[in-house]
Image (cartoon, rainbow, N blue to C red):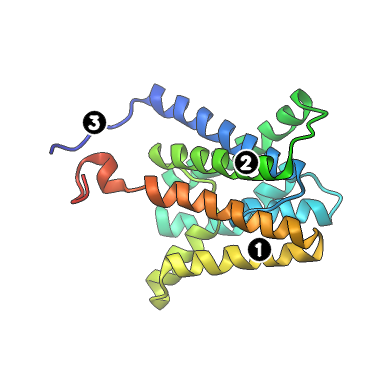
Amino acid sequence: MPPAPPHTPAEDVAGFLVGTFLASFGLFLLHSSTAVTGGTAGLGLLLSYALPVPFGVLFPLVNLPFFLLAVRAKGWGFTLRSAAAVLTVSLFSPLHAAALPALDADPVYAVLLGDLAAGLGILVLFRHRASLGGFGILALVLQERLGWRAGYVQMALDVLVVAASLAVVPPAVVALSAAGAVVLNLVLSMNHRPGRYTGTGSGS
């Protein structure tokens, strides 16, 4: 099967906006239930509960060291697109709060839908050669330098973030956050197969 044609610039812009909007809406739902998730998004949420600083400010800050790694591991193009995605998610954050100021959703619904929406948003960004930064970059670097499996490193870091939330949120919410993080990772693991997507891999 021939490789799939690349996205046009207009498609990349549209995909970027859709992906960041979905991800930011998912994180807004998680924040409404004082829940966390994996990755630096979860770390930003966790810090926003413990500090008098909004998530939209913390999310870019916690990603800064990972972007420094990304320049070397993934190149400037990917890094700049990912940095723009993180900043756009942060800018979208107050939009949801303004549009839904009195949101009172069931926590189970909000957390599971939030992780589903965030996972779909991240997936769209992957399709358009961007990401929301995060632990995946560190995991790839450790795999290249130390031979550690990137998937295991990512999983361990996600577990640490969710476990650390025990210090600021009730155990029941932590358990729900863990379930939601599984949903998010299932969305990515079942749908993010670069070879299948481009038509160049054995799974296509």
Could one spot residue 87 in this view of the protein?
Answer: no
- In the rendered structure, the answer to whether residue 86 lies left or right of residue 77 reads right
Say above or below: 159 vs 74. Answer: below
Say above or below: 15 vs 73. Answer: above
CA gap between label 2 and label 1 equals 17 Å
Could one spot residue 4 in this view of the protein?
Answer: yes
Percent of width and height locating residue 53: 82, 48
Give the class, few, some or many, for how many residues have Cα within 10 Å of label 2's Cα (few <14, many ≥20): many
- Which residue occupies 54% across, 60% down? 135
Task: Evaluate if marks 3 and 1 touch, with contact meaning CB atoms under 8 Å apart.
Answer: no
Label 2 is placed on what type of residue?
Gly
Say above or below: 175 vs 100. Answer: below
- Which residue occupies 41% across, 29% down? 12
CA gap between label 3 and label 1 equals 38 Å
Q: Which residue is mark 2?
A: 114
Of callouts 3 and 1, which one flags the residue occurring earlier in the amino acid sequence? 3
